[in-house]
């Protein structure tokens, strides 16, 4: 039975995936010891440059030294969990797990190659960048006793890409921290008041924000107000596109702290997931979808294989084809009806409470550990 784990590496404790698992483990009575060292605050685009790669390498070396200094010889643990982001620290985690005679769990959330090359287009095949990214990925996925995936679609990708046996993989959804204020209801609108449609992200191609802008353009004369939050790879292009199309119904908020993102999610009438057409977009269910479910908000997102593992079209979300602004606009029109918003919001909250709270998510990790 797992009674104590070491959460280890360069993971971000506030990132939803880590926060949900750590909170859930503790709520289930598991003692969680945290050994954490942060990496330099670099974007994916910066990491793909020679200067950014050099800063990253220096940060990884410093993280090893800081984690070594945190080592506690007499600590009794049942597993070492390398959280996200942590690809560079998996070899060190393997050494620590071997020293402790225990298991190593890696929670990658994504493949670096899939993110930098396939999704963001920052690294092309061939050259030192490609070789370095692939080498880090191969080591990170080969060394653990157990690799977590957020969906079965993602697990199948890991299995094929890294020749992992299925027994080394476990699917544990991301989930979300609870929102005590969530009711799952729909607010009535004043005469002429628009519905608030909210989407946030780091604006990589995966999010499909250009599809949202296409939908907003189709709805420019209808009662909808689109609110976009975050900054990232495509921010400049998206702001330029909003100006070019003259989308007065789109508001750009820029980067916001997690508490404000949660507040905007709770206040929204409708929350959007992702609409990108990449293979990676088809495999994942993003944080924003789990957060909307926890807040009891109606969700509209692309009906990808990953999304369909969790969501059921017309029951607890509306699923539309990826990269289809017309389909998105049609789904949003459907939610002008307050009863439809209320029904989907209540179903979203029920799904969250049934399967996606921190203890339920953490129970999936513990079950996988017990099966080893």
Image (cartoon, helix red, strand yellow):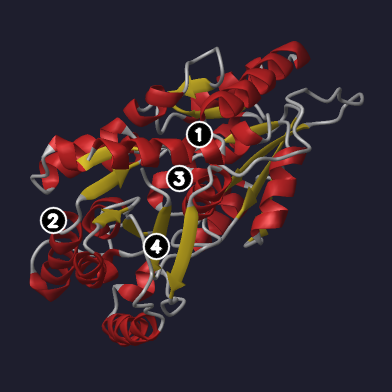
First reached walking from the N terminus: tag 4 or tag 1: 4
Residue 320 visible: yes
The residue under label 4 is: 6
| Above or below for 58 versus 113 | below
The Cα–Cα distance between marks 2 and 1, rounded to whole angstroms, is 27 Å
Q: Quadrant of the C terminus?
A: top left
> Image point 20% across, 61% down: which residue?
140
First reached walking from the N terminus: tag 2 or tag 1: 2
Q: Quadrant of the N terminus?
A: top left
The Cα–Cα distance between marks 4 and 1, rounded to whole angstroms, is 20 Å
Give the x, y percent position of residue 229. 63, 53
The residue under label 2 is: 142
Q: Secondary structure at mark 1?
A: helix
Q: Secondary structure at mark 2?
A: helix
Residue 213 image-quadrant placement: top right
The residue under label 3 is: 207
Q: Do the residues bearing badges 4 and 1 touch, measured as CB atoms within 8 Å?
A: no
In the picture, measured across the screen, residue 326 lies left or right of residue 157, that is: right
The residue under label 1 is: 360
Q: Secondary structure at mark 4?
A: strand
220 or 53: nearer the eye?
Answer: 53
Q: Nearer the viewer, mark 1 or mark 3?
A: 1
Give the x, y percent position of residue 215. 56, 32
In the picture, measured across the screen, residue 210 lies left or right of residue 156, that is: right
Q: Residues within 10 Å of mark 1 (few under 14, many from 20)?
A: many
Q: Do the residues bearing badges 2 and 3 touch, measured as CB atoms within 8 Å?
A: no
Q: Residues within 10 Å of mark 4 (few under 14, many from 20)?
A: many
| Above or below for 264 versus 136 | above
> Image point 83% across, 25% down: which residue?
187
């Amino acid at each position: 039975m797992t009674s104590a784990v070491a959460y280890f590496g360069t993971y971000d404790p506030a990132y939803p995936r880590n926060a949900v698992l750590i909170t859930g483990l503790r709520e289930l009575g598991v003692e969680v010891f945290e050994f954490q060292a942060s990496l330099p605050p670099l974007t994916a685009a910066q990491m793909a440059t020679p200067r950014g790669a050099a800063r990253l390498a220096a940060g990884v070396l410093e993280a090893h030294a800081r984690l070594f200094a945190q080592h506690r010889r007499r600590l009794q643990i049942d597993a070492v969990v390398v959280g996200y982001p942590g690809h560079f620290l998996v070899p060190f985690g393997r050494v620590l797990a071997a020293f402790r005679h225990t298991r190593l769990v890696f929670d990658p959330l994504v493949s670096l190659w899939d993110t930098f090359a396939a999704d963001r287009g920052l690294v092309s095949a061939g050259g030192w960048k490609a070789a370095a990214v692939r080498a880090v990925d191969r080591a990170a996925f080969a060394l653990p006793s157990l690799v977590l995936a957020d969906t079965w679609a993602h697990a199948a990708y890991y299995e094929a890409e890294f020749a992992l046996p299925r027994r080394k993989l476990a699917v544990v959804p991301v989930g979300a921290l609870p929102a005590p204020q969530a009711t799952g209801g729909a607010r009535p609108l004043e005469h002429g008041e628009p519905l608030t449609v909210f989407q946030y992200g780091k604006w990589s191609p995966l999010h499909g924000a250009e599809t949202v802008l296409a939908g907003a353009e189709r709805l420019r004369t209808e009662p909808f107000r689109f609110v976009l939050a975050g900054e990232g790879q495509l921010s400049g292009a998206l702001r330029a596109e909003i100006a070019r199309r003259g989308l007065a119904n789109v508001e750009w908020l820029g980067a916001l702290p997690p508490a404000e993102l949660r507040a905007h999610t709770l206040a929204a009438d409708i929350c959007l997931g992702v609409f990108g057409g990449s293979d990676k977009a088809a495999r994942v269910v993003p944080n924003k979808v789990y957060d909307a479910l926890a807040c009891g908000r109606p969700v509209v997102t692309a009906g990808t294989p990953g999304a369909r593992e969790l969501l059921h079209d017309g029951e607890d979300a509306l699923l539309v084809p990826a990269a289809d602004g017309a389909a998105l606009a049609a789904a949003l029109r459907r939610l002008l009806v307050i009863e439809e918003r209320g029904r989907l919001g209540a179903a979203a909250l029920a799904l969250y409470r049934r399967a996606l709270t921190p203890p339920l998510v953490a129970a999936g990790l513990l079950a996988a550990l017990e099966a080893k």
